[in-house]
Image (spheres, grey):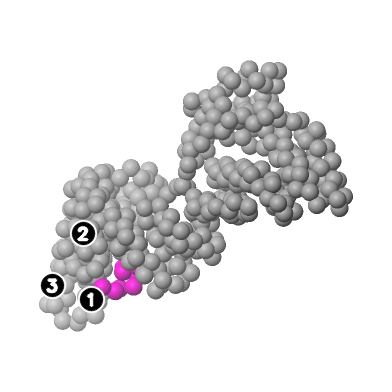
Amino acid sequence: MALAVMLTIQMADAQVKAPAEAKKAVETAAAATENPKKAAKPATWLRLADAYMDAYNAPMGNGWIGANKQELTFLMGNEKPTSTQTVTLAGESYTKETYSTMNYYFNANQQLAIIEVTAPVYEDALDQALSAYIKAEEVDAKGSKAKDITTGIKNISAKYVEQGMNSYLFGDLKSASTYFEKAVNASESAPDPVIDTMAVYNAGFTAWMTQDYARAESFFKKCLDLGYVEDGEVYAKLADIYSNLDKKDEAKSTLEEGFKAYPQNQSIIIGLINYYIESGEQPDELFALLDVAKKNEPNNASLYYVEGDIHNKLGHKEEAIAAYKKSNEINPDYEFGLIGIGILYYNEALELQEKASTEFDQAKYDAIMLDFEAALKNAIEPFEKAFSITKDNDIKVSIAEYLKNIYYRFRDQGPEYQEGYQKYSSIVENGL
């Protein structure tokens, strides 16, 4: 799951003004807009917009996205970072250099990948610049400045996207969604409105990640209207949103519509499977969908585990065990199918124990208890195999809890059972 990304390399802007100089230029340009005669001219508002853009860029120094470290060392002269450290963002390693007004983040190729402003001249410089461009368009009756206005607005939209990407990398998903939405709104502003479909998707994706489902719904519905579906992912996300908003019928119809258009999209298939499991509807359709998923990913062990789980829920014991085993055959390191078999037998034993507790005929009771013990012993092998292959200590402890209980039951039947009980009891109590 990730943002839709369009890779861009930015060229260096014109010579960046010092923050104090940029602020003074904004104040001068803003004062001009207070004059009614000057305010009636688009050039006045363009100067204000440009001044705010200069103020936005001023704290960034001379760096630009894509610049290599050697170039910047030459351009920045005596300006040195106050500190340098290695940081990890979204799983990637960066070298972070801290300056008085910004932080530079260099990727593994020593290219400047992120500029983080820490001392902005104005917090809302982009918003103010956009407002000035929109005002310039309003007073430009002849359309003589349409090209300049359009170029300026497109630049602001790109800056919003950049801010959104940065916020996403820093883990501030709420801010990221807001920036992407601002990019959408900016790109749709006159005089040359366009729809930035990627920004629409990213605004919805980050809203979905923060569980802001109402906002996410509006963006993903807009994506569908625009035909921007990210190979079907929009259908899966929108269906998940509907499920969380308790719109089950919309969730189902969205998944079915997505499946017709993108039958190989695993998110859609898994979404449909989960829907049928939760609703209890059309179990035959579930297996048909699973067959499609398995054809798409024949080596995906988890799909066979899901198949086993469905059979288990439907009371198809032998089919469930076969599917669980198949998941481990496909991937010998996949422990969950083995755990599924162990839990199936363990639960079967509990049901038999409950049944025995209400049986007053001694012969029938004894027969049930024999089945009970057989089910418990059947659970040992898959549980122990799962215990041996899993690399997750928490899962090991959970499996040990089952095995401790099983071995306790048979501790008087032989030394191997007593040893098993002591081994797994110690793990449950003390951990690994």
Q: Position of residue 134 (x, y in %)?
A: 70, 52
Span colored in magenta? 275-282
Question: Mark 1: which secondary structure?
Answer: helix
Task: Let me know if residue 285 appears in the view.
Answer: yes
Tell whether 282 sits left or right of 92: left
Q: Main secondary structure of the magenta part?
A: helix
Q: Is residue 151 above or below residue 402?
A: above
Q: Nearer the viewer, residue 415 or 198?
A: 198
Count up the numbered dots: 3
Residue 240 painted magenta = no
Q: Position of residue 129 (x, y in %)?
A: 71, 46
Q: Nearer the viewer, mark 1 or mark 3?
A: 1
The residue under the point 59% across, 51% down is: 192
Question: Mark 3: which secondary structure?
Answer: helix
- Residue carrying label 3: 367
Q: Is residue 309 above or below residue 76?
A: below
